[in-house]
Amino acid sequence: TTRIVLDCDTGTDDAVAIMLAALHPDLDLLAVSTVNGNVALPNTTENTLRVLDHIGAAVPVHAGAARPFVRPDFPIPRDVLNAGNPDFQVAHLDLPPSVTPVQDSSAVRMLVDTFSDPANADVVLVVTGPLTNVALALIAEPRLASRIHSLVLMGGAARVSGNVTATAEFNLWVDPEAARTVFSAGLREIVVVPLDATHSASMTLADCDAFDALGTTAGSTAAAMLRHRIRQDQTPDSHKSQASAPLHDPLCIAYLLRPEVVTSSGRHPVSVETTGEQTLGQLVVDTRPWTPEPANATVAFAASAPVFREVLLEAFAPGPAR
Ligand code: BDR
Ligand code: CA
């Protein structure tokens, strides 16, 4: 069993990542923390609580940062971004209001406490939103860098276009300084799952039908979310052969279960642009064989849709409730 802590900004695809992490029998989800991202912090927190209540998973939720590490807030008004990019869910997820309350202790306190405890030396930290909480935790307790077993994060566009600007992916663009702080903190192991990987393992309407056919709450919830994403992705200039959409965040969780779900080219020096006029938030992967910089992260350049699908079906299948 792999024990994990998930930091997220729920968010449509974050919700699927939460369900996968909470329900897969080979994973133990210890805690979830929330961050400003897809929607404002109160909404990412409420959405997260709703998802866990909906599937009957008793996992503590800790609210984190309401704004980026350095910047006062979003680089542009949130509604402009959402109108321009249908990838982002603006409202609460369409689930009943939460009954379970959020924890008293903050996300940063939870991260520091969890990873300072030697009993948690095996715990993997998964981040599927902006890296604000992790940067704050590393500043508060720099020794976390050597204590976090590994960090797996969804973010960046290495060799493909960004999804917010030409070069930037949403999670890194929202908080570039936090991302840079995390990449330069000297963590033992960072695995980056960028758009290159998530877009190469898009899910289809046939996958929605397969999730529905499982006859479970998680299966039909995942199907409903994916159908919504696929509808949003139907741009007139789309060259896709069939209707599909990426499920970014759960791919990080699938990686923990089946590392072969992604293909990487090994470890590279990785950083994030924080000053570029046109490249703010860009993931910079130095793949030069002769680079003088030290490698700090593994980058997934592609992913397998069949393996990803298998893991999701496994997790959402009927089974004993945990
Ligand atoms: C990332 O941005 C968010 O909208 C998604 O939840 C995902 O984490 C994709 O760029
Ligand atoms: Ca997310």
Image (cartoon, grey):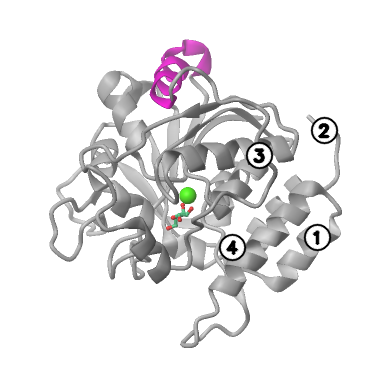
Residue at disc 1, secondary structure: helix
Q: Earlier in the sequence, mark 4 or mark 3?
A: 3
Q: What is the spatial separation of the Cα atoms under label 2 and label 4, in whole angstroms?
A: 28 Å
Depicted 115 relative to depicted 187: above or below:
above
Amino acid marked by disc 1 = Asp
Q: Residue at the location (66% across, 44% down)?
A: 20
Q: Which residue is mark 2?
A: 321
Q: Which residue is mark 4?
A: 304
Q: What is the spatial separation of the Cα atoms under label 2 and label 3, in whole angstroms?
A: 22 Å
**Camera-side residue: 212 or 312?**
212
Find the magenta span and give its range.
107-120
Q: Earlier in the sequence, mark 1 or mark 3?
A: 3
> Left of 94 or right of it: where is 148?
left
Residue at disc 2, secondary structure: loop
Q: Give the numbered dot on residue 212.
A: 1
Say whether mark 2 is within 8 Å of ligand 2.
no
Amino acid marked by disc 2 = Ala
Depicted 268 relative to depicted 256: above or below:
below
Q: Residue 63 location in percent, x, y?
A: 46, 29
Q: Residue 129 location in percent, x, y?
A: 43, 45
Residues at badges 2 and 1 in contact (C-beta under 8 Å)?
Answer: no
- Label 1 crowd bin: few (<14), some (14–19), many (20+), radius 10 Å: many
Q: Quadrant of the C terminus?
A: top right
Q: Earlier in the sequence, mark 2 or mark 1?
A: 1
**Camera-side residue: 233 or 284?**
233
